[in-house]
Image: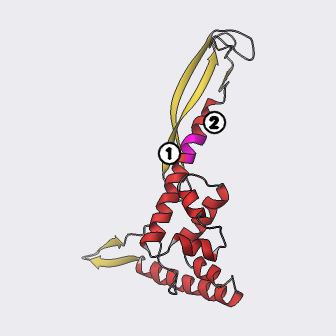
Amino acid sequence: MNKHNVVICPACGSQRVSRSEYENSNQLTLGSKFSFKEVLYTCNTCGEEGDFFAETDKNYLAAQKAAQLNLIKKILEDLHSNGISMALIERVFELPPRTLTRWKNGDFSSSALSLLRIIFTYPWIIEVAENKFEKNISCSAILTAAAQEIKDQQINMVFYSKKSNSTSTTVVNDIHQPIKKPPTSL
């Protein structure tokens, strides 16, 4: 765009450029789906197409950041509802005080989000961190978590029952359960 808000084709210099917007979406890992506007400019003279001003990138990044912030808040709320305090996480992972509060308020990095995803997916890692990642504790926590997962999978297996020459299948819901407290008291 020039100073008069006229779009000029970067390929041929024509001002005969049309703008289209499309709604698109993406999914965060462990998070919800988020939507953003995809922008496409088309030169009606030479046929050149593209997002000439990187508007789609800006829209995507803003929507992604909002979805990530919502995910951080959800994970921290789930931790709190399971009796795991932000102060405990900061202490065992040797984070500066009020770090999680800053994350919850939008001041976070991709590393911060990754750490919270790990804690959410493997809550027993808190016990491991609390014990300074000692190898015996780590192995014990992994084995305990694996045994629990096997037990949970047996509960969620498909059960077959025969009813008058036909087989009916009942599936117990196999959904991602909220995080559980680590095996030891914190």
Residue 177 at least partly seen: no
Q: Position of residue 103 (x, y in %)?
A: 57, 58
Q: Quadrant of residue 48?
A: top right
Tell me: residue 95, above or below residue 2.
below
Q: Residue 127 or 39: which is nearer the viewer?
A: 127
Q: Is residue 83 left or right of residue 37?
A: left
Residue 73 at least partly seen: yes
Q: Main secondary structure of the magenta part?
A: helix
Q: Position of residue 5 (x, y in %)?
A: 62, 14
Residue 82 is marked as none
Label 2: which secondary element? helix
Tell me: residue 29, above or below residue 162.
above
Q: How packed is label 1: few (under 14 Cα within 10 Å), some, or many (20 or more)?
A: some
Q: Which amino acid is tagged 2?
A: Asp
Residue 57 is marked as 2
Q: Is residue 56 left or right of residue 182?
A: right
Q: Which amino acid is tagged 1?
A: Phe
Q: Position of residue 112 (x, y in %)?
A: 63, 60
* Mark before the other along the chain sequence, 1 or 2: 1
At 70% across and 86% down in the image, what residue appears? 134
Residue at numbered disc 1 = 34
Distance CA(mark 1)–CA(mark 2): 14 Å
At 68% across and 83% down in the image, what residue appears? 132
